[in-house]
Image: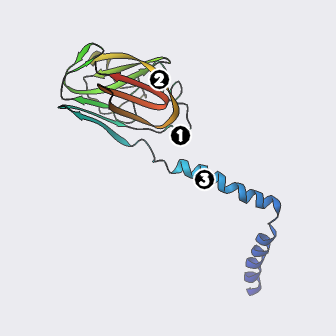
């Protein structure tokens, strides 16, 4: 019985010791590179974390609350987010937009208050939609956007800009570009909605 117990560990050591050689050394050298790529993707947070964009200047307060998904090697616009369909503009909950003052956007007034923010991406332009209804989730049980068009307060069409480098995580910002400008960017796509 004792001989069998010794034989098994010794045979494993011999097998492992004899399994070297040039082919296995090459495989061992290649493995760390593969692990580095996998590790980089593993370091991205799981899911779509909550994010907030804020603007606070000269008494104007704007806040956007959204969930920020990652690209993770996927085709985004025209793929994960289809063209010509309403998108919840992020993930999970419906994206919210709130302003404490009336805004003039594309020559039209958007009254102060809370809104949900929706978009319809097209290849060369996007429709950006401010909707008066608050929704508990961004999509319904079939996966379609929860937005009800009759509650739209303002719809603005803006051109698409192509970015020089990939934006891995979807981002919404309110930038001070002379006037407060709502900026959405993900992958190689950027759209901007200036207050005019």
Task: Report the Cα–Cα distance between label 2 and label 3.
Answer: 32 Å
Image x and y of residue 37, in percent: 60, 49
Closer to us: 75 or 3: 75
Residue pictured at 39% horizontal, 43% vertical: 49
Task: Report the Cα–Cα distance between label 1 and label 3.
Answer: 15 Å
Mark 2 or 1: the one toward you: 2
The answer to which of marks 2 and 3 sits earlier in the sequence is: 3
Image x and y of residue 52, in percent: 31, 39
Label 1 Cα neighbours within 10 Å, binned few <14 / some 14-19 / many ≥20: few
Residue 94 visible from this viewpoint:
no
Element on which disc 2 rests: strand
> Residue lying furthest bottom in this view?
2
Please give left or right for residue 45 compared with residue 55 in the image: right
Mark 1 or 3: the one toward you: 3
Residue pictured at 73% horizontal, 87% vertical: 2
Image x and y of residue 153, in percent: 26, 17
Q: Which residue is mark 3?
A: 36
The answer to which of marks 2 and 1 sits earlier in the sequence is: 1
Residue 171 visible from this viewpoint:
yes
Please give left or right for residue 1 compared with residue 66 in the image: right
Please give left or right for residue 128 compared with residue 114 in the image: right
- Residue 161 is tagged as 2
Q: Specify how the rendered protein is coloured.
A: rainbow
Image x and y of residue 133, in percent: 25, 24
Quarter of the image for residue 196 reads top left
The answer to which of marks 1 and 3 sits earlier in the sequence is: 3
Asked if disc 2 and disc 1 are in contact, CB closer than 8 Å, the reply is no
Residue pictured at 43% horizontal, 31% vertical: 185
Q: Which residue is mark 1?
A: 72
Please give left or right for residue 92 compared with residue 132 in the image: right
Q: How many badges with numbers are in the image?
A: 3
Quarter of the image for residue 102 reads top left
């Amino acid at each position: 019985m004792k001989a069998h117990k010794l034989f098994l560990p010794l045979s494993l050591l011999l097998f492992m010791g004899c399994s070297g050689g040039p082919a296995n050394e090459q495989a061992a050298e290649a493995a760390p590179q593969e692990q580095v790529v996998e590790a980089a993707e593993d370091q991205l947070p799981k899911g779509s974390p909550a994010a907030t964009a804020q603007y606070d200047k000269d008494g104007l307060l704007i806040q956007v609350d959204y969930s920020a998904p990652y690209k993770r090697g996927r085709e985004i616009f025209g793929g994960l987010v289809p063209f010509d369909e309403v998108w919840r503009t992020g993930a999970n909950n419906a994206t919210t937009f709130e302003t404490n003052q009336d805004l003039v956007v594309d020559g039209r007034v958007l009254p102060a208050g809370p809104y949900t923010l929706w978009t319809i991406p097209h290849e060369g332009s996007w429709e950006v939609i401010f909707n008066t209804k608050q929704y508990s989730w961004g999509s319904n049980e079939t996966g379609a956007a929860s937005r009800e068009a009759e509650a739209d307060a303002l719809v603005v069409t803006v051109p698409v800009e192509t970015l020089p480098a990939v934006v891995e995580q979807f981002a919404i910002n309110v930038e001070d570009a002379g006037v407060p400008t709502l900026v959405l960017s993900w992958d190689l796509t950027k759209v901007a909605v200036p207050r005019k």
